[in-house]
Image: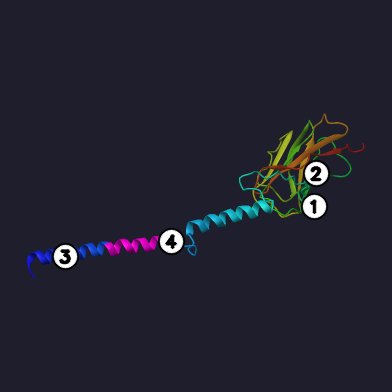
């Protein structure tokens, strides 16, 4: 076979391959257009349209719209009840028979506590009438800090280590020569429970002079 024949044969093969390729592409396009073939993109669109139609039929609102506000009925506020018997309680008693000018007069203060939290600090602040002076602590749970002898007016007693409840403190005061008639002693306890300072209500006691 000469060179011209070889070149002619190769050209024929190339032309035949091109014809076969075009024929195959044409068959594939015809297959995609057949009624039995389902387009994936069309299927998704149809499903979405179907779901929207179903929501419209069921009366559901689109998610973009705001729902109407719901009014929740509220009752009266619930009162917080304190444990029964909680808090520090204070009481005061004085020597029977009344006071005499220039003689020591005993006063006792008692404390009771039934709360759930431990008392971590305790003090007693007493206010004596004008003309009276402090003498000494005479009994009970003795505090670390006490008024000086001869102190008048406000007397402060402080416990560094809080005594066990119930407990009592007794102290002596002396009425001066000008003291006459009924006299009022008042005071309150100051305490803590791992929090802010708390105080009992001011307790007032009236003492009378002894009969002549």
Q: CA distance from mark 1 to mark 4?
A: 90 Å
- Give above or below for 51 relative to 90: below
Residue at left offset 48%, top offset 56%: 41
Q: Which mark is residue 62?
A: none
Pointer 1 or 3: first along the chain: 3
Q: Are the residues flagged by discs 2 and 4 in contact, CB closer than 8 Å? A: no
Sequence order check, earlier mark of 2 and 4 = 4
Q: Are marks 2 and 3 in contact (CB under 8 Å)?
A: no
> Residue at label 4?
32
**Mark 2 or mark 1: which comes first in sequence?**
1
Q: What is the span of residues highlighted in magenta in the rendered image? A: 19-29
- Of tags 2 and 1, which is closer to the observer? 1
Q: Is residue 30 left or right of residue 182?
A: left
- Pointers 2 and 1 in contact (CB under 8 A)? no
Mark 2 to mark 4: distance in Å? 116 Å
Residue linked to disc 1: 85
Disc 2 to disc 1, how far (Cα)?
A: 29 Å
| Chain-order first, disc 3 or disc 4 | 3
Gap in Å between the C-alphas at discs 2 and 3?
A: 138 Å
Residue identified by numbered label 3: 10
Q: CA distance from mark 3 to mark 4?
A: 34 Å
Can you tell which of label 2 and label 4 is closer to the viewer? 4
Q: Secondary structure at mark 2?
A: strand
What residue would you read off at disc 2?
106
From where the camera sits, is residue 122 visible? no
Question: Is residue 106 in view?
Answer: yes
* Mark 2 surroundings: few (<14), some (14-19) or many (≥20) residues within 10 A: many
**Nearer mark to the viewer, of 1 and 3:** 3
Tell me if label 1 and label 3 are in contact, CB under 8 Å.
no
- Residue 89 placed where, x, y %? 78, 48
Badge 1: few (under 14), some or many (20 or more) residues near its Cα, within 10 Å? few
């Amino acid at each position: 076979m000469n060179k011209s024949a070889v070149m002619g044969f190769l050209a024929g093969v190339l032309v035949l391959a091109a014809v076969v390729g075009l024929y195959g592409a044409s068959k594939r396009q015809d297959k995609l257009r057949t009624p039995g073939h389902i387009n994936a993109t069309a299927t998704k669109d149809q499903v979405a349209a179907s779901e929207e139609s179903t929501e419209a039929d069921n009366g559901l609102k689109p998610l973009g719209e705001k729902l109407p506000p719901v009014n929740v009925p509220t009752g009266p506020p619930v009162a917080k009840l304190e444990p029964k018997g909680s808090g520090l309680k204070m009481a005061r008693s004085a020597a029977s028979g009344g006071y005499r000018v220039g003689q020591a007069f005993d006063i006792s203060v008692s404390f009771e506590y039934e709360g759930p939290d431990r008392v971590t600090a305790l003090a007693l602040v007493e206010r004596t009438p004008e003309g009276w002076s402090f003498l000494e602590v005479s009994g009970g749970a003795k505090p670390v800090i006490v008024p000086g002898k001869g102190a008048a007016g406000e007397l402060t007693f402080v416990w560094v280590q809080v005594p066990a409840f119930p407990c009592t403190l007794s102290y002596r005061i002396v009425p001066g020569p000008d003291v006459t008639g009924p006299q009022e002693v008042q005071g309150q306890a100051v305490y803590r429970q791992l929090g802010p300072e708390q105080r009992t209500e001011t307790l007032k006691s009236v003492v009378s002079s002894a009969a002549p």
